[in-house]
Amino acid sequence: MFETQRRWLIWQAALAHGQKAAADAPQKFAPAEGQPQKMLADEAAVRNRVLNEVLDAFSELDDNAGVEGIVKVIQNLKKKSRAQAEEKI
């Protein structure tokens, strides 16, 4: 049960972390009307980069950290994302 919850939280963190990339280039991620959605190479690269960042952040987590540790990792990812957004401004 704990492993499933941990993986779900990791996935949610990856999705939230990747929203910034989608916001930076919304036209790239918007589906064309009437056409099936194809994953572009640059979109796949962004998704892989985001997923790898999230997995790296969680790999440093101690097995005994529990949900509190997961929450800390997610908060650190959010802080990192905000800092990167402020640098671009």
Image (cartoon, rainbow, N blue to C red):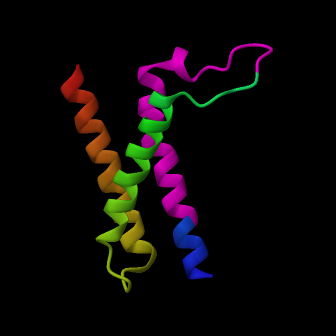
Measured along the vertical axis of the image, is residue 28 above or below residue 22? above
Q: Position of residue 8 (x, y in %)?
A: 58, 63
Q: Which residue shows up at 54% across the image and 67% down it?
A: 7
Residue for point 76% across, 18% down: 35
At 28% across and 30% down in the image, what residue appears? 85
Q: Residue at x 41, y 68 (%)?
A: 70
Farthest left residue? 87
* Image quadrant where one finds the C terminus: top left
Q: Is residue 13 magenta?
A: yes
| Residue segment shown in magenta | 8-35
- Secondary structure character of the magenta stretch overall: helix
Tell me if residue 55 comes above or below residue 6 in the rendering: above
Q: Position of residue 76 (x, y in %)?
A: 29, 55
> Residue 14: image x %, image y %?
47, 50
**Quarter in which the N terminus is drawn:** bottom right
- Please give left or right for residue 29 compared with residue 73 in the image: right
* Left or right position of 52 against 86: right
Residue reaching furthest front? 41
Q: Spot the residue most to the right.
A: 34
Identify whether 51 is placed above or below 23: below
Where, by quadrant of the figure, is residue 71 drawn? bottom left
Q: Position of residue 39 (x, y in %)?
A: 59, 31
Please say whether residue 51 is one of the residues in the magenta stretch: no
Judging depth in this view, the residue of 5 and 38 nearest the camera is 38
Q: How many marks?
A: 0
